[in-house]
Image (spheres, helix red, strand yellow):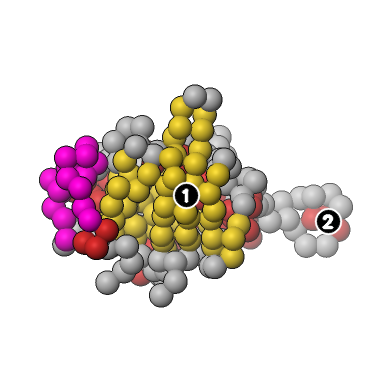
């Protein structure tokens, strides 16, 4: 099996700070890959390169075997990669349906849409409701409800549903449960499992080790700007993963899970 997303030797500098120092990455179809690492390990910089938010200073990236260079998030989206950043990028004053089609608004057919540029609000609401239903999101009953009235978990659900609606291959989730309580975090984890069951590939960036071990197929450990190891919940305990993150444990490449079982 070939990786759906692959990177070799990625370098990203911010002035005198080197965030990525020859980072490698492999993501395989249909898996949930967790990316963990201490603060400053380069997790966010790595993911932002795949999301099109950053351009690497050196190194190469491939999507489906094709070498790519992403100049923007739109470039990544064109390759089927959607990202839900910690900021969620939702507009609080708009309703749920409008947020799900933010930047991709549907317009009415004919003269009203092509000339007057009127939005097809009914069509967007119908499609948004269908998408939420398909993901099993039952907490958002009123699709016309303003996002500013939603809880943190509900806002996260809107952002994930939007990514699932348009991400044809890969969905990247950056700390999706960081600001959520236990109950709402559990619902987000259920969403991740559902995305995998639908055949989507998920990248999960998280500091929450129990959550990582609950949903991840493989775990990419980032340290000092590069990949320190790739393990699985079965091959390495949480303590082992923390040891790799801190440099206390060194895992030989022959013992790593560089590809799916």
Image position of 247 (left or right of 132): left
The residue to which callout 2 is attached is 114
Foreground mark, 1 or 2?
1
Residue stretch in magenta: 235-252
Name the N-terminal-most of marks 1 and 2.
Answer: 1
For label 1, the crowd category at 10 Å Cα-Cα, with few meaning under 14, some 14 to 19 and many 20 or more, is some
Residue 65 rendering spot, x and y as whole percentages? 54, 68
Q: Residue at x 28, y 52 (%)?
A: 229
Residue 73 rendering spot, x and y as whole percentages? 60, 47
User: Furthest-top residue in view?
Assistant: 16
Whether residue 239 is visible here, answered yes or no, is yes
Q: Name the image quarter holding the N terminus.
A: bottom left
Tell me the element at label 1: strand
Residue 233 rendering spot, x and y as whole percentages? 19, 58
Verify whether residue 248 appears in magenta: yes
Q: Residue at x 16, y 55 (%)?
A: 236
The residue to which callout 1 is attached is 9
For label 2, the crowd category at 10 Å Cα-Cα, with few meaning under 14, some 14 to 19 and many 20 or more, is few
Whether residue 242 is visible here, answered yes or no, is no
């Amino acid at each position: 099996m070939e990786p759906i997303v692959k990177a070799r030797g990625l370098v990203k500098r911010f002035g005198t700070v080197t965030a990525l120092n020859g980072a490698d990455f492999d993501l395989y179809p249909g898996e949930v890959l967790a990316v963990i690492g201490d603060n400053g390990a380069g997790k966010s910089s790595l993911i932002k390169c795949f999301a099109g938010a950053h351009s690497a200073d050196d190194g190469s990236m491939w999507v489906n075997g094709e070498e790519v260079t992403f100049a923007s998030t739109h470039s990544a989206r064109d390759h089927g990669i959607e990202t839900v950043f910690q900021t969620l990028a939702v507009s609080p004053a708009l309703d749920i349906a409008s947020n799900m089609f933010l930047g991709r608004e549907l317009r009415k057919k004919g003269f009203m849409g092509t000339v007057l540029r009127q939005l097809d609000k009914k069509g967007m609401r119908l499609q948004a409701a269908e998408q939420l239903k398909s993901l099993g999101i039952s907490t958002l009953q009123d699709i016309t409800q303003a996002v500013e009235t939603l809880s943190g978990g509900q806002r996260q659900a809107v952002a994930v549903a939007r990514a699932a609606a348009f991400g044809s291959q890969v969905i990247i989730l950056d700390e999706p449960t960081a600001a959520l309580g236990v109950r709402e975090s559990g619902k987000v984890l259920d969403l991740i499992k559902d995305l995998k069951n639908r055949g989507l590939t998920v990248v999960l960036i998280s500091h929450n080790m129990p959550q990582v071990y609950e949903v991840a197929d493989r775990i990419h450990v980032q340290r000092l700007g590069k990949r320190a190891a790739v393990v699985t919940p079965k091959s390495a305990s949480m303590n082992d993963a923390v040891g790799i993150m801190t440099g206390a444990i060194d895992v030989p490449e022959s013992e790593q899970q560089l590809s799916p079982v």
